[in-house]
Each structure stands twice: as C-alpha cells, then as structure tokens.
Image (tube, rainbow, N blue to C red):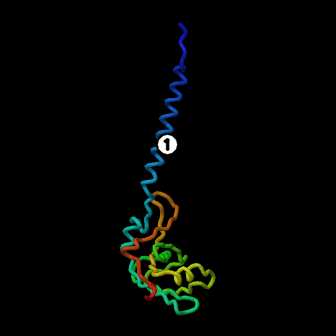
Amino acid sequence: MKKKGVSQLIATVLLIALVIVIAAVIFFWVRGFVSEQIEKFGKPAEQVCDEISFDATLNTETDPMTFYVFNKGNVPISDFSFKTYSGGNSQVIALGSGVAAGTVQTFSLGTSDQELPQAILNADRVIVIPDLKGFVKGTSKIKSINCDENSLGKLVYEREG
C-alpha cells in the first residue's frame, strides 16, 4: 500500500510558520491597546498636566484676533490646541506656540494663516487646551501630549444667541 501525505518536515515547517503568524497578529493587536508613556520631569506627562494653571482670553474683535495666555504655574506649556464646536462636529487646531512658566504671552491669530481664525468665527464655542512635550519613556524621542480637555480646557469663545 502506497502512503500519500505531507512529509513530516513540511508539516513541522508549516506549523512553526502558523505559530509565528498568530503570535505576530496577537502582538500587534495588544500593542494597539498599550500606549507609549510620555514623561516630563521624570513623571508621567498626565500627572504633570494636573500641575498646569493658566488663564486664557480670546479677543475676536481685533484684526488679527488676539489670544492672551497667562501661565500661572511652574510648568512650561509647549503648545495650545483650539477645539472648535460647530453643531455636532468638533475640530482641533494646534496653535504651534507655547508659554514659559510664570509668563504672559500674546499671540496674533491669522497673521500668516487664516485657518484658525476662520474656524473660530464659524464655531459655536471654542475651548483652548494646553499641550506638553516630553520624552517617550526609555528613549530620547520627544512627543506631544494633549492634556485633559475636561479638567484643563478653558472656554474662550461662545457664539451669542
């Protein structure tokens, strides 16, 4: 009787390849749930966000619009994001500039780019959110993190009526 089938060597190679593929799929799936930890001053950036204290005012009556920030805390703010709400939609636009600890800064919005002022004028309300830059834990890579909008976001514009 003649036997037909896959040789033991080929079966072993196929099983090993299958296990490697399954392990890779599981690895990348789990990696999506685990985010990189960003550190600032040797602490997780989320904890440093809790130490931020600032006041912000937006003057839409001037041309160009003027954004005032007073950083009352000891943490330098790397950037600000403006979150605009129009109807049921929201959009986040980064300012691209920050404020050193304990200082006041004035920004003219729209001198080089009209995207932010136009988004603000078309919005029902605008919240400004501080951003921090820190190192990805265990590397020298710098990454930005948005602080929590609910605890730190400041309402700077709301359409009347």
Residue at point 43% right, 68% down?
Answer: 40
Q: Nearer the viewer, residue 81 or 132?
A: 81
Residue occupied by mark 1: 24
Q: How many marks?
A: 1
Residue 71: x percent and y percent? 43, 83
Q: Nearer the viewer, residue 39 or 84?
A: 84
Left of 53 or right of it: where is 60?
right
Residue 156: x percent and y percent? 44, 84
Indicate the amino acid at tag 1.
Ala
Residue at point 45% right, 44% down?
Answer: 26
Q: Secondary structure at mark 1?
A: helix
Vertical order, 129 against 106 (above or below): above
Residue extending farthest bottom: 62
Vertical order, 27 against 50 (above or below): above
Image quadrant where residue 147 sits: bottom left
Image quadrant where residue 50 sits: bottom left
Left of 119 or right of it: where is 102?
left
Left of 53 or right of it: where is 23?
right
Q: Nearer the viewer, residue 91 or 79?
A: 91
Residue 112: x percent and y percent? 63, 82
Category of crowding for the residue at label 1, using alpha-carbon neighbours closer than 10 angstroms: few (below 14), some (14–19), many (at least 20): few
The C terminus lies in which quarter of the figure?
bottom left
Residue extending farthest top: 1
Residue at point 61% right, 85% down?
Answer: 111
Q: Nearer the viewer, residue 4 or 38?
A: 4
Vertical order, 25 against 88 (above or below): above
